[in-house]
Image: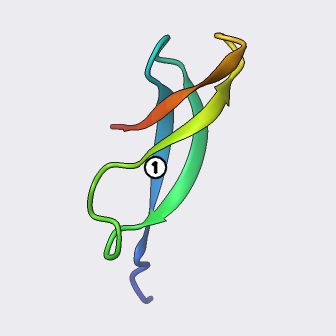
Amino acid sequence: MAKSKRDQVILACSECGEHNYITTRNKKTHPNKMETMKYCSRCKKETLHKEAK
């Protein structure tokens, strides 16, 4: 079975810490941790979401 170059990551809200999203990223082209603006249902606004371990 071939190894995938994509890595599954969990995005957590930087304000409240809730794990809201699961997505994938190409670990070869993007070696750093992922950060993106997403909607948080607990905060009820768009906040910065960072990759969580």
The three-letter amino acid code for the residue at tag 1 is Val
Query: At 47% from the left edge and 14% from the top edge, which residue is drawn?
Result: 15
Judging depth in this view, the residue of 44 and 8 nearest the camera is: 44
**Vertical arrangement, residue 34 with respect to residue 24, above or below:** above
- In the image, residue 18 sits, relative to residue 48, either above or below, namely above
Placement of 40 over or under 6, stated as above or below: above
* Residue displayed at 57% across by 52% down: 23
Q: In which quarter of the image is residue 35?
A: top left
Query: Residue at position x 48%, y 29% from top?
Result: 12
In x, y percent, where is residue 11? 50, 37
Instruction: Point out residue 5 in the picture as x, y percentages from the top left corner.
Output: 40, 77
Quarter of the image with the N terminus in it: bottom left
Residue of label 1: 9
The residue depicted at 40 percent of the width and 49 percent of the height is 34
Total number of numbered discs in the rendering: 1
- SS at mark 1 in the image: strand
Q: Is 35 on the left or on the right of 28, as rendered?
A: right
Q: In the rendering, at what x and y percent does residue 27 appear?
A: 34, 68
Q: Where is residue 45 in the image (x, y as percent from the top left)?
A: 69, 18
